[in-house]
Image (cartoon, grey):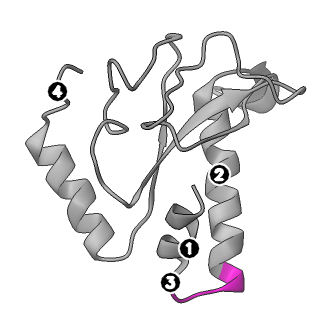
């Protein structure tokens, strides 16, 4: 996304943040530097977005994971994750879409431990 101008989505994510909602987003799976070519919504300059890259079992960035020093907030396990598939099946899958649920789960645990102000604590720690 050049310039990452998607006003409707950006406004919706911003308003969700104003209402106290955290938005956890995939950095993408194209080996791109999101600082140079931001993905949507990671390229939005909003405090309520956590942009997630993916790592393997050795905590090394997956070869296809997007990255970025300023636009990607953290990386989480996303390699060879056993997950659900259509038609009641399961398979090992890899990518940032597998890493995002790990971060969402951690954020949910923080919410249980500290119900008030979780978004500010989570986003400040990134």
Residue at (90% x, 26% y) in the render: 58
For this rendering, which residue is in front, 92 or 88? 92
**Residue topped by disc 2:** 103
Residue at (53% x, 89% y) in the render: 116
Neighbourhood count class around disc 4 (C-alpha, 10 Å): few under 14, some 14–19, many 20 upward: few
In the shown orientation, is residue 82 left or right of residue 95? right
Position in image of residue 22 (x %, y %): 44, 63
Position in image of residue 82 (x %, y %): 82, 30
Of the 4 image quadrants, the one containing the C terminus is bottom right
Q: Mark 2 or mark 1: which comes first in sequence?
A: 2
Q: Residue 3 — which label?
A: 4
Neighbourhood count class around disc 1 (C-alpha, 10 Å): few under 14, some 14–19, many 20 upward: some
Q: Mark 4 or mark 2: which comes first in sequence?
A: 4
Neighbourhood count class around disc 2 (C-alpha, 10 Å): few under 14, some 14–19, many 20 upward: many
Q: Mark 3 or mark 2: which comes first in sequence?
A: 2
Distance from the alpha carbon under mark 1 to that under mark 4 = 28 Å
Distance from the alpha carbon under mark 2 to that under mark 1 = 14 Å
Say if 113 sits above or below 94 in the image. Answer: below
Q: Residue 117 — which label?
A: 3
Distance from the alpha carbon under mark 3 to that under mark 2 = 17 Å
**Residue topped by disc 1:** 121
Cβ atoms under marks 3 and 2 closer than 8 Å: no
SS assignment at label 2: helix
Marks 2, 1: nearer the viewer: 1
For this rendering, which residue is in front, 19 or 86? 19
Majority secondary structure in the magenta region: loop
């Amino acid at each position: 996304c050049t310039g990452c101008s998607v006003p409707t989505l950006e406004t919706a994510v911003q308003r969700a943040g104003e209402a106290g909602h955290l938005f956890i987003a995939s950095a993408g799976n194209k080996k791109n530097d999101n600082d140079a070519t931001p993905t949507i919504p990671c390229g939005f300059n909003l405090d309520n977005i956590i942009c997630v890259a993916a790592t393997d079992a050795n905590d090394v960035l997956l070869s296809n994971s997007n990255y970025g020093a300023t636009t990607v907030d953290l990386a989480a396990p996303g390699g060879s994750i056993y997950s659900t598939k259509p038609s009641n099946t399961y398979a090992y899958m890899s990518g940032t879409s597998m890493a995002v649920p790990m971060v969402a789960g951690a954020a949910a645990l923080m919410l249980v431990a500290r119900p008030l102000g979780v978004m500010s604590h989570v986003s400040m720690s990134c």
